[in-house]
Amino acid sequence: MKSAVPTLLAVAAGLALAFALGVAVETFSAVVHPFPPGFDPNAPGSIPEHVRRYPDWVLAVAALAFNLSMLPYVMQFKIAMPATFFVACLLGIRLGRPASEAFK
Protein backbone atom coordinates (compact mmCIF):
# COMPACT_ATOMS: atom_id res chain seq x y z
CA MET A 1 0.00 0.00 0.00
CA LYS A 2 2.90 2.34 0.75
CA SER A 3 4.15 2.15 -2.86
CA ALA A 4 0.72 3.03 -4.27
CA VAL A 5 0.64 6.49 -2.67
CA PRO A 6 3.88 7.77 -4.24
CA THR A 7 2.80 6.30 -7.58
CA LEU A 8 -0.55 8.08 -7.43
CA LEU A 9 1.17 11.31 -6.42
CA ALA A 10 3.60 10.97 -9.34
CA VAL A 11 0.72 10.42 -11.77
CA ALA A 12 -1.12 13.45 -10.36
CA ALA A 13 2.04 15.57 -10.63
CA GLY A 14 2.54 14.43 -14.23
CA LEU A 15 -1.04 15.32 -15.11
CA ALA A 16 -0.72 18.72 -13.46
CA LEU A 17 2.51 19.41 -15.36
CA ALA A 18 0.95 18.34 -18.66
CA PHE A 19 -2.01 20.65 -17.99
CA ALA A 20 0.28 23.56 -17.10
CA LEU A 21 2.38 23.07 -20.23
CA GLY A 22 -0.76 22.88 -22.37
CA VAL A 23 -2.03 26.14 -20.90
CA ALA A 24 1.39 27.75 -21.44
CA VAL A 25 1.47 26.72 -25.11
CA GLU A 26 -2.08 27.96 -25.70
CA THR A 27 -1.31 31.27 -23.96
CA PHE A 28 1.85 31.72 -26.05
CA SER A 29 -0.14 30.97 -29.22
CA ALA A 30 -2.87 33.43 -28.27
CA VAL A 31 -0.28 36.18 -27.74
CA VAL A 32 1.80 35.67 -30.90
CA HIS A 33 -1.01 34.59 -33.27
CA PRO A 34 -4.37 35.80 -31.93
CA PHE A 35 -7.69 35.01 -33.52
CA PRO A 36 -8.68 37.52 -36.22
CA PRO A 37 -11.60 39.89 -35.52
CA GLY A 38 -14.95 38.23 -36.09
CA PHE A 39 -13.49 34.72 -35.77
CA ASP A 40 -16.07 32.07 -34.88
CA PRO A 41 -14.35 29.11 -33.20
CA ASN A 42 -17.57 27.09 -33.41
CA ALA A 43 -17.75 27.25 -37.22
CA PRO A 44 -16.81 23.92 -38.81
CA GLY A 45 -13.17 23.84 -39.87
CA SER A 46 -12.34 27.25 -38.39
CA ILE A 47 -9.77 26.05 -35.83
CA PRO A 48 -7.78 23.87 -38.28
CA GLU A 49 -7.74 26.79 -40.73
CA HIS A 50 -6.45 29.13 -38.02
CA VAL A 51 -3.71 26.66 -37.06
CA ARG A 52 -2.78 26.23 -40.73
CA ARG A 53 -2.04 29.97 -40.85
CA TYR A 54 0.40 29.88 -37.91
CA PRO A 55 3.75 31.41 -38.78
CA ASP A 56 6.47 28.79 -39.05
CA TRP A 57 8.50 30.37 -36.26
CA VAL A 58 5.64 29.88 -33.76
CA LEU A 59 5.57 26.16 -34.49
CA ALA A 60 9.37 26.00 -34.31
CA VAL A 61 9.42 27.69 -30.90
CA ALA A 62 6.87 25.14 -29.60
CA ALA A 63 8.97 22.28 -30.99
CA LEU A 64 12.17 23.66 -29.46
CA ALA A 65 10.56 24.16 -26.06
CA PHE A 66 9.09 20.65 -26.18
CA ASN A 67 12.46 19.11 -27.06
CA LEU A 68 14.33 21.02 -24.37
CA SER A 69 11.82 20.14 -21.69
CA MET A 70 11.35 16.46 -22.57
CA LEU A 71 14.81 15.25 -23.61
CA PRO A 72 17.73 14.94 -21.20
CA TYR A 73 20.07 17.49 -22.78
CA VAL A 74 23.15 18.74 -20.93
CA MET A 75 23.01 22.35 -19.75
CA GLN A 76 25.22 23.59 -22.61
CA PHE A 77 22.63 22.42 -25.13
CA LYS A 78 19.78 23.99 -23.19
CA ILE A 79 21.58 27.33 -23.50
CA ALA A 80 23.02 26.94 -27.00
CA MET A 81 19.87 25.68 -28.73
CA PRO A 82 17.63 28.72 -28.01
CA ALA A 83 20.52 31.07 -28.83
CA THR A 84 21.17 29.28 -32.11
CA PHE A 85 17.47 29.28 -32.90
CA PHE A 86 17.29 33.04 -32.32
CA VAL A 87 20.28 33.70 -34.58
CA ALA A 88 18.88 31.35 -37.25
CA CYS A 89 15.55 33.21 -37.15
CA LEU A 90 17.28 36.54 -37.62
CA LEU A 91 19.35 35.18 -40.51
CA GLY A 92 16.25 33.64 -42.07
CA ILE A 93 14.37 36.92 -41.87
CA ARG A 94 17.29 38.83 -43.36
CA LEU A 95 18.25 36.33 -46.05
CA GLY A 96 14.68 35.29 -46.85
CA ARG A 97 14.04 38.60 -48.57
CA PRO A 98 14.41 38.99 -52.32
CA ALA A 99 18.06 39.20 -53.36
CA SER A 100 17.79 42.90 -54.17
CA GLU A 101 16.78 43.71 -50.58
CA ALA A 102 18.78 41.14 -48.57
CA PHE A 103 22.13 42.90 -48.41
CA LYS A 104 21.20 46.57 -48.25
Image: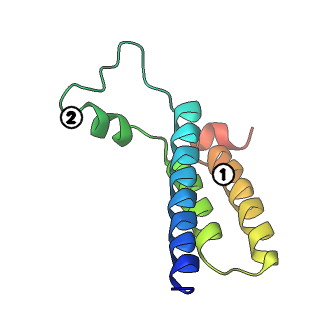
Left-right relation of 79 to 98: right
For mark 2, what is the residue?
45
- SS under mark 1: helix
Residue 68's label in the rendered image is none
> How far from the left and from the top, in percent, is residue 78?
75, 70
Q: Nearer the viewer, residue 14 or 53?
A: 14
- Relative to 58, say whether 32 is above or below: above
Name the image quarter holding residue 41: top left
Disc 1 marks a residue whose amino acid type is: Cys
Sequence-first disc among 1 and 2 = 2
The C terminus sits in image quarter: top right
Mark 1–mark 2 CB contact (< 8 Å) = no
Type of the residue with mark 2: Gly
Q: Is residue 24 above or below residue 83?
A: above
Question: Which residue is drawn at the image coordinates 66% and 51% (left, top)?
Answer: 89
Q: Residue at x 58, y 65 (%)?
A: 13
| Image quadrant in which you'd find residue 38 | top left
The crowding category of the residue bearing disc 2, from other C-alpha atoms within 10 Å (few below 14, some 14 to 19, many at least 20), is few
Marks 1 and 2: which is nearer the front?
2
Q: Secondary structure at mark 2?
A: loop
Residue 60 spot, x, y in % from top left: 54, 55
Residue at image mark 1: 89
Residue in front for this viewpoint, 41 or 34:
41
Q: Which residue is drawn at the image coordinates 39% and 37% (left, top)?
A: 53
